Amino acid sequence: MTHSWDIFCKVVDNYGDIGVTWRLARQLVAEHGLAVRLWVDDLTPFARLCPGASASAAQQWQAGVDVRQWPAQWQPVEVPGVVIEAFGCKLPEAYVAALDARSERALWLNLDYLSAETWVGGCHRLPSFWAKGYQKFFFFPGFREDTGGLLREAALLASRQQFDRAGFLASLGVRPAAGTLLCSLFAYENPALGSWLEGLAASPRPVHLLVPQGRIEAGVVAWLGEPLAVGTPLQRGALVVQALPFVEQDAYDRLLWACDFNAVRGEDSFVRAQWAGRPLLWHIYPQEEDAHRVKLEAFVQLYSEALSAPARQACAALQDAWNFNGDMASAWAGYLACHAELAAHAEDWCAALAARPDLATELVQFHRDWL
Ligand code: TRH
């Protein structure tokens, strides 16, 4: 049972909780030869990321992962050698009791949220003591050497290099005019959206903005002043806006690779945009009392260390305006003035991150060391 892992996922909202755990589960199976059960309390978002999946099956196999509906009434199951609770979701009491009672110790991990803040390194791999002295370890993803790294499949960057961009875009009905800056937009509702769209429409370089269906769409439609049908481009000044369907998770990666600039949100799309090697605009998950400001600043600071002062300033101004309702039109103009440097930097940043072990490998190694 040391080759069997359980991952527990509670969907708080949106797609990030399942997005991260589904990706991790697939990679542990495909690259580390593990048997993985993924327990999910709400399979509806899962079926959107993985269109072949059922939103209601008690059990299903997807990409070699044993996907289970986490039942409201927990039924006893055998506890495997490794148990991951994602983002502090609470395990069923009966399951914890079975974990405690297991004759051979099992490794219990809490996979935490991603942050570039320096305190993360001090908490990564730390144990906390549970009832009966059972240890649970905190495992933190991250950008720095002293963290658990980021989810990255072994073939990810090579696949990006070989990717048929024109073919992929044509399959979505996207035909950007020559010289256009192709952008994608995935975000929560955002009061700064209007000023960004104004800035894009007035842009000296034509912009083609792809908008997968989701929470930002209503704001785009309000700014356009007319409905936006999936696939039909609408033009305003230098800006073409085109709605796309919500695509499956691997296709979303390709969408990020295909674009010159990506607006992303949450945790998982944010990481995938970095593996795309393109400049990104991060709509960080908003927290009470602006707690996300510190997290955003920590990332921007780390990300910008190797940039010239003007590019660093342009990058910070853009992220700040987007997240805290600033003037996106002027922040975008500032960004465009540094676009070449920021585009080159995005590739360098991706390469530097890729030189580190990925999160799944770090988890497997941690388990080996613990045994
Ligand atoms: O959806 P998110 O905002 O998710 C989360 C949750 O809200 C969570 O509670 C919170 O803690 C976390 O953010 C910070 O953003 P995220 O993490 O980027 O997840 C989106 C997923 O959706 C990601 O796996 C990519 C996927 N996706 C597709 O598969 N197809 C698409 O067309 C798009 C736009 C996204």
Image (cartoon, rainbow, N blue to C red):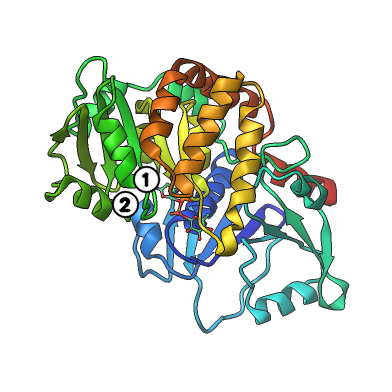
Mark closest to the chain's N terminus, 2 or 1: 1
The amino acid beneath tag 2 is Ile
Could you tell me which residue is drawn at 86 percent across and 77 percent down? 132
Judge whether residue 98 can be spotted in this image: yes
220 or 344: nearer the viewer: 220
265 or 276: nearer the viewer: 265
Residue holding disc 2? 216
Could you tell me which residue is drawn at 53 percent across and 48 percent down? 267
Mark 2, Cα crowd under 10 Å, few <14 / some 14-19 / many 20+, is some
**Up/down of 320 relative to 162, above or below:** below
Could you tell me which residue is drawn at 28 percent across and 20 percent down? 204
Name the side, left or right, on which 343 lies relative to 180: right
Could you tell me which residue is drawn at 37 percent across and 22 percent down? 163
The amino acid beneath tag 1 is Phe
Q: Mark 1 CB in 8 Å range of ligand 1?
A: yes
Numbered disc 2: secondary structure: loop
Quadrant of the image occupied by residue 258: top left
Please give the count of numbered marks on the rendered protein: 2
Residue holding disc 1? 186
Instruction: Locate residue 220, reporting x and y percent.
Output: 24, 48
Identify the image quadrant of the N terminus.
Answer: bottom right
